[in-house]
Image (cartoon, helix red, strand yellow):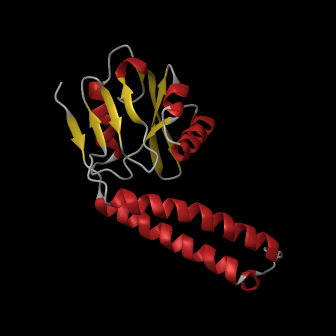
Amino acid sequence: MEEIQIELSRNKILLLLLLGIVFFLISVILITKPSEFLNYKMRSEKLILIIGWVGFILFGIITMFLFIKLFDSKPGLVINKKGILDNTSTNPSGFIKWSDIISVVVKKSGYIQFILIKVKNPNEYIERSGRINRIALKQNTREHGTPLVLTSTSLKCSFEELKKYISENLPENVDSELSQ
């Protein structure tokens, strides 16, 4: 098996960064001028402030991580005979051994498609990550049943190409929906 390296897409990351900045700035406006957003649906300044602060924190963190990712020179994803090295997102999974993988499933949420990689030992992948990344991986587990979620959002490839690369290199004993 030849090693496959998929680079990060600076254009996609820059677009996500700009969207993050826009939502961050909207959150700042909600915090500084909550009374201007009162209407028949939104009657509470307190609720507007809470929404503003949640957005401020959330989009502030996301924007910071996207800014850092913009200058990341490592490949976004590496597929080789040992497994998959994920560096695709602000909370990458790291190295996923082929021998740990039980199944691979495709899921769609809105316009975004994911590849969910279910492993024998999900807690091992969560525990080996950093503190902030651990929170994101635990959220992935609650939401998707696995901490390991791949998407092509920040990669220089389409989702179909990502599926193809992984599908062609999966061991035969792994239950997969990728070729469907």
Q: Residue furthest left?
A: 2
Where residue 94 sits, quadrant-wise, is: top left
Residue placed at 32% from the left, 42% from the top?
160
Residue placed at 40% from the left, 63% from the top?
67
Q: Position of residue 27 (x, y in %)?
A: 62, 73
Where residue 93 sits, quadrant-wise, is: top left
73 and 78: which is toward the camera: 73
* Number of numbered discs visible in the structure rendering: 0
Q: Is residue 37 left or right of residue 15?
A: right
Q: Position of residue 55 (x, y in %)?
A: 63, 66
Q: Residue furthest top?
A: 173
**Residue 4 sits above or below residue 152 on the image:** above
Which quarter of the figure is the N terminus placed in? top left
Q: Position of residue 101 (x, y in %)?
A: 42, 22
**Residue 33 sits above or below residue 140 on the image:** below
151 and 61: which is toward the camera: 61
Q: Position of residue 54 (x, y in %)?
A: 67, 63
Residue placed at 48% from the left, 32% from the top?
128
Residue placed at 74% from the left, 73% from the top?
49
Q: Is residue 164 left or right of residue 151?
A: left
149 and 49: which is toward the camera: 49
Q: Is residue 104 left or right of residue 38?
A: left
Which quarter of the figure is the C terminus placed in? top left
Q: Is residue 62 left or right of residue 17?
A: right
* Residue 77 can be seen, yes or no: yes
* Residue 180 can be seen, yes or no: no
